Amino acid sequence: MRPEYMTRHLDILDPKLAASKKITVIGAGAIGSFTVLALAKMGFTDITVYDDDVIDPENMNCQFYPISMIERKKVDALKELITDYTGVTINAIDGRVGEDHVFEGDFLICAVDNMKTRKNLFQYSWACDTLIDPRMAAEYCTMEVLRQGESTANYNATLYTDEDAVQERCTAKSTVYTSVLIAGEICKVVKDITKGESYIKSLEWDIGSGSRLAWNSMGTKL
């Protein structure tokens, strides 16, 4: 992005530092689309996004896509939108992530909608510095942050099966305010880790009731 676009947050995040980080986002849906937009607006430019889905009419309520892009591939549409909105050209890859993928770099953001893919990423593909795993349903979201060298026991315990996951009604699955709120939390974590500051390590947020529990990287309840 052009330097003048960053003037309002220069004292918060150095664009040169942001541009030096390599970020991979798996999933270009509700969480992924808004997260990529925000990261690009923050000055992160080395962003790769994977998704093999198309934009459907029911995505209009909670994803960063205009009605005119219905039926287009999500990654292609997102690449075009991010360039229009930020001047950043992301690396958009149309495809599923298999066990043969190994992701390196600074951040791997697992913005997927099923537990099988999460397990595969964690067990076979995770070779980056930081794994961020956000999840959402209707008015509820969680986030776990795991860094290389840390114990994986707590995170591994969150990898239940898709069959054990709570299935929301079709008319109560997603809200845009939950999407943008968790996207903001993700981007704050990326910024904090990039600057070497304390960050949210675990988050559980029932937005419907207003209940929020979070712990930082020092083990302190927030």
Image: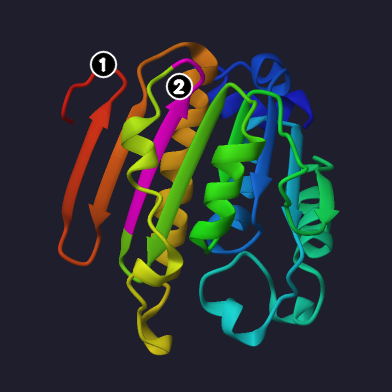
* Residue 179 falls within the magenta-colored stretch: no
Instruction: Provide residue 20's location: percent of width, then percent of height.
Output: 72, 17
Q: Does 101 sit left or right of 31 as displayed? A: right
Q: Amino acid at mark 2?
A: Asp
Q: Secondary structure at mark 2?
A: helix
Q: Which mark is residue 124?
A: none
Residue beneath disc 2: 192
Is mark 2 in CB contact (under 8 Å) with mark 1?
no
Instruction: Provide residue 154's location: percent of width, then percent of height.
Output: 31, 34
Asked if residue 49 can be seen in this view, the reply is: yes
Q: Quadrant of the N terminus?
A: top right
Name which residue lies at 36% across and 86% down: 169
Q: Amino acid at mark 1?
A: Met
Name which residue lies at 79% across and 82% down: 71
Residue beneath disc 1: 218
Q: Nearer the viewer, residue 158 or 205?
A: 158
Instruction: Provide residue 106's location: percent of width, then percent of height.
Output: 64, 23
Q: Residues within 10 Å of mark 2 (few under 14, many from 20)?
A: some
Name which residue lies at 65% across and 14% down: 17
Q: Choose top left, top right, bottom left or bottom right for residue 4.
A: top right
Q: Secondary structure at mark 1?
A: loop
Boundaries of the magenta span: 141-149
How far apart are the two marked residues, 2 and 1, measured between alpha carbons? 13 Å
Q: Choose top left, top right, bottom left or bottom right for residue 215.
A: top left
Asked if residue 12 can be seen in this view, the reply is: no
Q: Choose top left, top right, bottom left or bottom right for residue 104.
A: top right
Q: Residues within 10 Å of mark 1 (few under 14, many from 20)?
A: few
Name which residue lies at 46% across and 56% down: 180
